[in-house]
Amino acid sequence: MSLEPYKLVWTLQENGTPIESGTVENLTAAPGQAHEAELDYQIPTAPAPGAGYFLNLSVQLKAKTPWAAAGHEVASYQVPVRVSTPMPTEGSYAGLRPLTMSIVRGKGITLTGQNFSVSFDKKTARMTSFKYKTKEMLESGLYANFMRVPTDNDEGGGKESYAPRWREAGLDSLKLVGSDLRVEKLKAHVYKVSLVKSLQGQAGSLLVTSIYTVHATGDIHLQNTFSASGTWPPFARIGLQFEMPASFDKVQWYGRGSYESYADRKSSAMIGQYAGTVDAQHFPYIMAQENGSKTDVRWLAVTSADGLGILAISDSVFSVNVHNYTDSAPTAAKQPAVALVKGNTTVVDLDLAQIGLGGGDSWSPRVHDAYLLPAQTYSYSFCLSPIDAKDDISKRASTKLPTIAQVMSPGMGPAQVDEESPKQEANARPPVKKVYKKTYAKRRK
């Protein structure tokens, strides 16, 4: 069969938004032959600062057939287009009042700027509040997450599969055994907060360092480092999770979409800008499990109906999940006659990466080595920015923060031991030789 029944539709996009398109109608190659086509797209003469460009190619039916409608896509491909662009515009503190810090002895600090405030709790070693225009945007602050709701493939191989090994290693029940909070004023408009915590599982320990650089613009830059010691299996994910009130039920992102994608299952998901409800990000597999991931994400916005919310901007790319239920909900729904409970919260995962799905079969661990996350040191960084309906998200995401020294010496402070959970952690001293015998409940997700 020749290519005559098909046409090639191309689209040039800038920062995930189409800016030019065209169609090649005269595809004539016979089976085994090639067809060379010239695409007359034009790169903007004045590219946007820091912009990214992609060329999307789609082979579609010209006319209706007994098996598909006209315009049905039979093949697609996306090509990155290298373009020299101006450096991103740097943000400014002009007209903004300096940050102020208030301290609650033994509890933590609050940094307040123009129209926003952010709080850090000493006891939990976590950012616990992020308010914008008096509206609280956090229900539970950011905490390290190395686990996912197991997929069928994660469970299918019995004790040799990943999920049983994760549970045996204690990734679903990590204990907080050490923490610290330190603050440094860099200048009137910039503070740096260092949070360090030591987590203990059955297979070893994990040291999590998060450095928050808070700017008077409301932007918060996070540098995160995860260091593992012990005999851990490959991690399910490397990242941070937090909860927002359920009213934050809209999501928009620049990355792969519009459907879910994973490290080893993403080539058909084109990079672009997509939007929808948080509820629509759920995929109803027959067995409740991990779902809805988006990969190669440059930025993610989670907002309420009025457009106010949080914009997360990766320094490179990250993997994200946004759902209107905690991880405990699909875990419980794996049981017969237990329905998935949704709608009580908005849970956001901002991950450096998530392990692949595998797919060679469902009865043995088949994730290829390239898509595993071995126990080692990982680092990634991103920015959290408050936004409202007036913000141009693409422009906001491409604005560079003022350059600030990124080195700070963190420490570990003395306190007591408690469990690690999204709602409650305890300030503790780092484990040295002491063995703790208390049993800790599974972390709520």
Image (cartoon, rainbow, N blue to C red):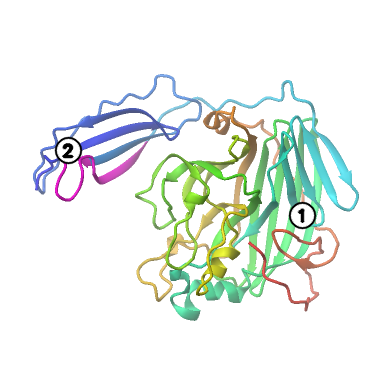
Horizontal and vertical percent for residue 191?
Answer: 77, 38
- Residue at 44% in and 24% down: 47
For label 1, count other residues whose C-alpha is less than 10 Å away and answer few (under 14), some (14-19) or many (20+).
many
416 up-or-down from 267: above or below: below
Q: Disc number at residue 62?
A: 2
Q: Which residues are drawn in magenta?
A: 60-80
The answer to whether residue 279 is visible is yes
**Residue 72 shown in magenta:** yes
Q: Which residue is tagged 1? A: 125
- Residue at 69% in and 61% down: 207
Among the two numbered marks 2 and 1 on one chain, the one whose residue lies closer to the N terminus: 2
Give the farthest residue toward the right. 105
For label 2, count other residues whose C-alpha is less than 10 Å away and answer few (under 14), some (14-19) or many (20+).
some
359 up-or-down from 257: above or below: below
Horizontal and vertical percent for residue 234?
Answer: 53, 67
**Residue 355 shown in magenta:** no
Amino acid type, label 1: Ala
Amino acid type, label 2: Lys
